[in-house]
Image: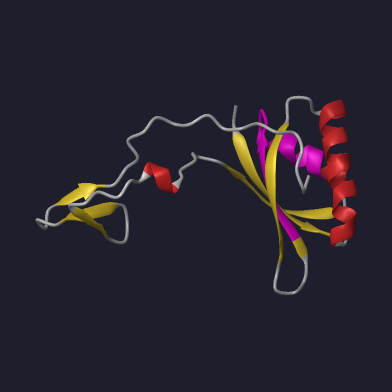
């Protein structure tokens, strides 16, 4: 199933966010049971405005947008479909190579090789709770 990054700007203070998150879970359970809220990263921008970057699994972007519309208390800034996940562990350092900018590595001999993850994709944890809905 597709996964999405949902960028939001909230119309509430930080102390009100847990209530918004609980309402998000309730709306998803009752009206959008195919949506899985994996987790969120909550930040405060330089102007003191509360934002979140939430990871959802859902059948399509429209369902994510309908859920957000019912939730309220925020502006839906962007919805991005996730193309894949990588971590630093996907790019092991090799003793005979030095990293360069871009997607290539330079070997100590001066020849170039692509720097792509060689490990199989890891399963993603699925959660329906977290700090920001």
Image check: 68 left or right of 84?
A: right
**Which residue occupies 82% across, 54% down?**
74
Quarter of the rendering occupied by the N terminus: top right
Q: Choose between 116 and 95: the one closer to the eye.
A: 95
Q: Is 63 included in the stretch rendered in magenta? A: yes
Q: What is the number of callouts on the image?
A: 0
Task: Classify the position of the C terminus by image quarter.
Answer: top right
Q: Is residue 98 magenta?
A: no
Image coordinates for residue 19, horizontal then vertical, percent: 90, 47
Image x and y of residue 114, in percent: 25, 46
Residue at 29%, 50% in the rendered image: 93
Q: Residue at x 31, y 61 (%)?
A: 101
Of residues 46 and 4, the one nearer the viewer is 46
Residue 52 visible in rendering: yes
Residue displayed at 46% across by 43% down: 86
Classify residue 97 by image quadrant. bottom left
Range drawn in magenta? 51-68
Residue 44, horizontal then vertical, whole percent: 73, 65
Residue 104 lies, with reference to residue 39, above or below; the image says: below
Residue at the limit of the structure toward the bottom, as seen here: 47
Residue 89 picture quarter = top left
> In the drawing, does residue 43 fall left or right of residue 18?
left
């Amino acid at each position: 199933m597709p996964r999405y990054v949902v960028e939001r700007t909230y119309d509430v203070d930080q102390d009100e966010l847990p209530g918004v998150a609980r309402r998000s879970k309730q709306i998803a359970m009752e009206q959008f049971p195919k949506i899985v809220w994996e987790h969120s990263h909550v930040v405060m921008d330089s102007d003191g405005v509360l934002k979140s970057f939430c990871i959802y699994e859902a059948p399509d972007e429209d369902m994510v947008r309908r859920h957000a519309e019912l939730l309220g208390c925020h502006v839906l800034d962007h919805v991005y479909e996730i193309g894949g996940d990588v971590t630093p562990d996907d790019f092991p350092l090799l003793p005979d190579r030095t990293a360069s900018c871009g997607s290539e590595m330079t070997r100590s001999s001066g020849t170039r090789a692509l720097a792509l993850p060689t490990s199989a994709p890891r399963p993603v944890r699925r959660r329906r709770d977290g700090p920001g809905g």
